[in-house]
Image (cartoon, rainbow, N blue to C red):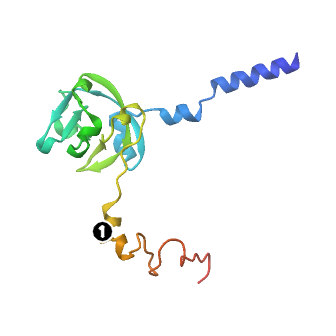
Amino acid sequence: MRGLRLFSILLTAYLCAPSHAAAKSACIHPDQALQHVGKDVCVQAHVYRVVDAAQQTRFLDVCSPETHDADCHFFIVNLQRDAKNVGDLSALAHRNIRIRGRVRLVEGRAEIVLSRKEQLHGGKEKFRANPKLLQNFAAENGDKAIVDKNGTSGQRGVHFQHGVQ
């Protein structure tokens, strides 16, 4: 009897406790995106329209038509180079979506770049190397990708001095 009661208590606690996976998959509102700059988050938003801009860049407009442009602080952008990976966006107009991506700050507004259609189903953005790290890098010349201030690459030559002056 006591074992059954303990089992019931543990089962109830397990079912009622928020799981780590559920907490991780929770989405934020677009108005909260500015508070998450630099973080990989899920944003749940309503797409009012898909806007084709210059140079084949597309935007998912998640601000209502009544919202002034200056008051719209979040947008989703699909760049020309990613158009093939994402496909037709017109089906997203007038729908609620969830998008996952890293929030970036652009001219005081938060944005997520839609680079892969999988982002609409919890997937990550397409990986792109940081061009600043690759500047003047030529592996065929024996260059090192990462060089520390001592001129060595990798972890060799990196010494940590804890409390030593």
68 left or right, relative to 122: left
Q: Residue furthest left?
A: 54
Question: Which amino acid type is marked by label 1?
Answer: Gln
Q: Residue furthest top?
A: 1
**Which residue is labeled 1 in the image?**
135
**Image height check: is 141 above or below 80?**
below
> Can residue 109 be seen?
yes
> Can residue 73 be seen?
no
Foreground pick, 138 / 19: 138
Give the x, y percent position of residue 126: 36, 46
Image-quadrant location for residue 83: top left
Q: How many marks?
A: 1
Give the x, y percent position of residue 141: 35, 76
Q: Residue furthest front?
A: 140
Image-quadrant location for residue 142: bottom left
Give the x, y percent position of residue 122: 43, 34
Foreground pick, 153 / 98: 153
Check the picture and name the quadrant holding the N terminus.
top right
Image-quadrant location for residue 71: top left
Q: Residue furthest bottom?
A: 165
**Image height check: is 149 above or below 15?**
below
Local SS, label 1: loop
Give the x, y percent position of residue 84: 25, 38
Check the picture and name the quadrant holding the C terminus.
bottom right
Residue shown at 34%/44% (left/top)?
Answer: 34
Q: Residues within 10 Å of mark 1 (few under 14, many from 20)?
A: few
Residue shown at 42%/37% (left/top)?
Answer: 123
Residue shown at 28%/36% (left/top)?
Answer: 86
